[in-house]
Amino acid sequence: MNNIRQTLYLWLLLCLTACSDSTPQINLLSDDAVILAFGDSLTHGTGASKGESYPAILENSINRKVINAGVPGELSMQGLKRLPELLDKHQPKLLILCHGGNDILHRENLADAEANIRQMITLAENKNIPVILLGVPKPSLFLNPAKLYANIAENTNVIFIPNLIPDILSDASMKSDPAHPNKSGYRKMALALADTLRDSGAL
């Protein structure tokens, strides 16, 4: 009897572990669904030619409209002011959020940046728009996502991809400068996001 209980306990533990590691689910995106890629230069595609940004490659990869709403140099406070109009204008079915990098680079108050990004997520969720959040690294010898992104992901419903950008910027063959990918790096971003969309049930 004890062996049976132990077996059932192990089975339940494995199930719970598998569930915790799975990608949160997103409703299937219709063929005419719009995705809003919102952020700064990492979204804009700085470091690559026009058409080589991750939103452009993602659009071609998944056959859905992906709006590139990246503004180089933008701080999170500015992004928070800009986002509501874009949500109203494009009425996206998904928001891919990659913001806060300039706050990190310019040594802005990261607690404020965290609050700003949280408010961006709230704006989307109030319109029933799911969010994919990308982590951005702090400059250092070994690149890891700034802690603020994990803080946000812990108590929101976002799909969080922490290490995609840090991994790309750790590979000299995939970056155009210390802060930006090149076309190969943006392609890797786009394909990873496409995989996430499939894993989440959005495609």
Image (tube, helix red, strand yellow):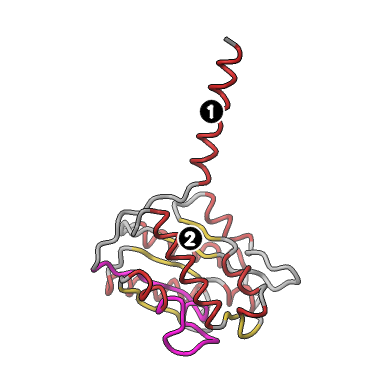
CA neighbours of label 1 inside 10 A, class few (<14), some (14 to 19), many (20+): few
Callout 2 amino acid: Arg
Residue 190, placed above or below residue 149: below
- Residue range highlighted in magenta: 32-56
* x, y percent for residue 40: 50, 78
Which residue is disc 1 drawn over? Answer: 11
Which residue is disc 2 drawn over? Answer: 118
Q: Is residue 33 left or right of residue 175?
A: left
> Does 144 appear in magenta?
no
* x, y percent for residue 69: 40, 78
Residue 9, placed above or below residue 81: above
* x, y percent for residue 80: 44, 71
* x, y percent for residue 155: 51, 49
Which residue is pictured at 43% across the width and 50% down the height? 24
Which residue is pictured at 49% across the width and 76% down the height? 187
- Mark 1 vs mark 2, CA separation in Å: 36 Å
The numbered mark at residue 125 is none
Q: Give whichever of discs 1 and 2 has the lower sequence position.
A: 1
